[in-house]
Amino acid sequence: MKVKAILFFLLLSTALFANPFSGQIGLVIIDAGHGGNDPGAVGFGIYEKDVTLELALALKAELEKNDIPCVLTRESDVYLSLEERVSFARSQSYKAGTYPIFISLHCNSSDGESAAGTEIYIKKQLSTPNFYYKDLANVTLLSYSSYSKIQLNRYLNIRNYNLADTVSKEFQSAFPLMKSRGVKETDYYVLINNPITAILIEVGFLSNKEENALITSPLFQVEAAEAIRKAIL
């Protein structure tokens, strides 16, 4: 009887204090960068806002095909502020016992045409977001309730890096001829104000003529979506 009681306590403790950023992904929030009167980077007549939306729609289709719940911050050419994007992500609900991730899609640009490659951004590890925003979904608040901000930030940093690193490796596998610029830390608004797992992907440079042609092709967008899906599973 005592053994059963001890086992029950251990199982209950594990359920209550499991890392809130581990386990099964319950929702993927796909953020198509820029939009509306904000074109983003422009290269050879191509607007970043259009490419990111195409990539977001391709990723949504790929995830839905594999029964992975997902939502888009925008589904058409509309403007959303950075605050609106992050608030939308924070407020999304999902199945208890799972966790959400936020993926922001972008295209890079440079003054010269030689810069090329894919790079993945995560928040600076020393930057601690507010884990108790008023617009945070109840399921998220509940999963965070047993932890201090220091613990949550430590877990979040690990998950952010692991996801970004896996996405980077999947891109290298899918596009071996593309340069990998690795995983970098930054203080982008959508990352440092996001208390959930969040990465920002710069898929390539619109200012590079060859890469511009590559990342705007439907085949690339489908294969990029597949690479991201493999990384998050």
Image: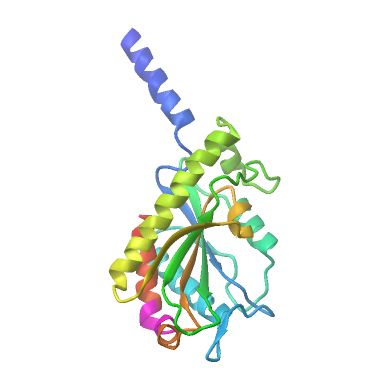
Vertical arrangement, residue 86 with respect to residue 171, above or below? above
The answer to whether 227 is drawn above or below residue 16 in the figure is below
21 displayed left or right of 84 = left
Q: Residue 63: horizontal and vertical position, in percent?
A: 41, 64
- SS assignment for the magenta stretch, majority: helix
Q: Residue at x 57, y 42 (%)?
A: 139
Q: Nearer the viewer, residue 114 or 22?
A: 114
**Which region is colored magenta?**
214-220
Is residue 19 something that shows in the picture?
Answer: yes
Q: Is 167 colored magenta in this rendering?
A: no
Residue found at the very far top of the displayed protein: 2
Q: Nearer the viewer, residue 124 or 4?
A: 124
- Can you give x and y, in whole percent of width and height, for residue 86 in the image? 63, 57
Toward the bottom, the furthest residue is 45
Q: Residue 209, image x and y in percent?
A: 44, 88
Frontmost residue, 22 versus 168: 168
Which residue is found at the position 58% from the left and 79% from the top? 41
- Residue 85 in the figure: left or right of residue 231: right
Q: Which residue appears at 60% of the width and 56% of the height? A: 187
Quadrant hosting residue 189:
bottom right
